[in-house]
Amino acid sequence: MPQASMLSLIRRLLPQRQPDPAPQGRERLVAQQWPSAVYAIGDIHGCLPELQRIEQMILEDAAGVTGEIWLVYLGDYVDRGANSAGVIDHLLSPPPAGTRRICLAGNHEELMLAYCRNPVAGAQWLKLGAAETLQSYGVPMAGFATASVQARLGRLRSHIPFGHLEFLESLPVALSLPGVVLVHAGMKPDVPLDQQSDDILQWMRYEPASTAPWPEHLLVVHGHTPAAEPYISPGRICIDTGAYATGRLTAIRLVPGEVPHLLTATAHGPAE
């Protein structure tokens, strides 16, 4: 199946939950000044080799940059891909010298946490890539779906490190820099960031043909909605290239006053 057709099918299967104007729960980071460069990384979804390769490409790209570099991960580290556990281990490891890691929360982190708290209330996760995540932690899957709640919780607690869940619980939901907001799913351009719920920032989807007015000096960089190629417009950039389905993980370099620069990696090297 052609890549574009595959991603079109994926989008039809994605959860279509409507954002809920619930109270804020996660932190919104606000930076008053830019570092030397920001590299945002799109949805990883358990694709550890692609993550390792894109980080290598970023370090090569940033070799001439003086000053601190921020690596900003836009969420959805788990589900669908083969090694969610390895991805979390990697994100918890020390960052490369001269860089700072900032990991934002995606909707799949919320789904995983909800299930680990209450397998009945959080059952939606099982339909959205949970099996691959559980297998990556070594959770025995035989009879898992039909086991009692206590039995399932027992398997989760004996295989998923508490530190991983603590990490997912602690993630902020957005990073705001002068003129730019980085977030998992997007934001409403006509509503201040601090007035938007976590659900909007983690679940919303933009209408492809939307003509809603956009603030002149606001750029939103996000993932969540996969496409064969990054989406770039004057006010919005989406860098989710469906890594778990396409093998392509995309990052973008952001430096004030410069044109954003895209990098796309496969497990074995730069994408063609």
Image: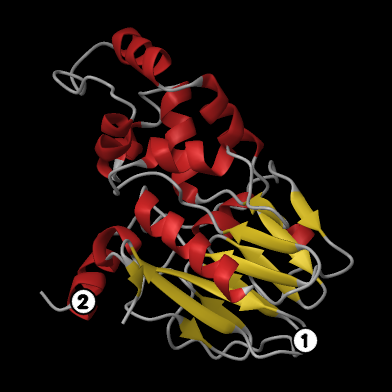
First in sequence, mark 1 or 2: give its number. 2
130 left or right of 207 in image:
left
How far apart marks 1 and 2 lie (CA) works out to 34 Å
158 left or right of 28 in image:
left
Rendering quarter of residue 136? top left
Q: Are marks 1 and 2 in contact (CB under 8 Å)?
A: no
Instruction: Give me the residue at 53% from left, 20% from top.
Output: 162
Rendering quarter of residue 40? bottom right
Q: Position of residue 222 (x, y in %)?
A: 55, 68
Q: Position of residue 61 (x, y in %)?
A: 58, 75
Rendering quarter of residue 159? top left
Q: Position of residue 113 (x, y in %)?
A: 48, 32
Which of the two residues, 219 or 50, is positioned nearer the viewer here? 50
In the orientation shown, which residue stands out farthest toward the left?
A: 1
105 left or right of 86 in image:
right
Figure check: 107 above or below 160: below
- What residue did someone put label 2 on? 3
Marker disc for residue 128: none
57 left or right of 190 in image:
left
Figure check: 257 above or below 105: below
Quadrant of the snapshot with the C terminus = bottom left
Which of the two residues, 269 or 75, is positioned nearer the viewer here? 269
Within-10-Å neighbours for mark 1: few <14, some 14–19, many 20+: few
Specify how the rendered protein is coloured: secondary structure
Instruction: Give me the residue at 20% from left, 69% from top.
Output: 9
Type of amino acid under label 1: His
- What residue did someone put label 1 on? 217
Type of amino acid under label 2: Gln
Asked if residue 82 shows in the view, the reply is yes
In the orientation shown, which residue stands out farthest toward the right?
A: 32
Asked if residue 204 shows in the view, the reply is no
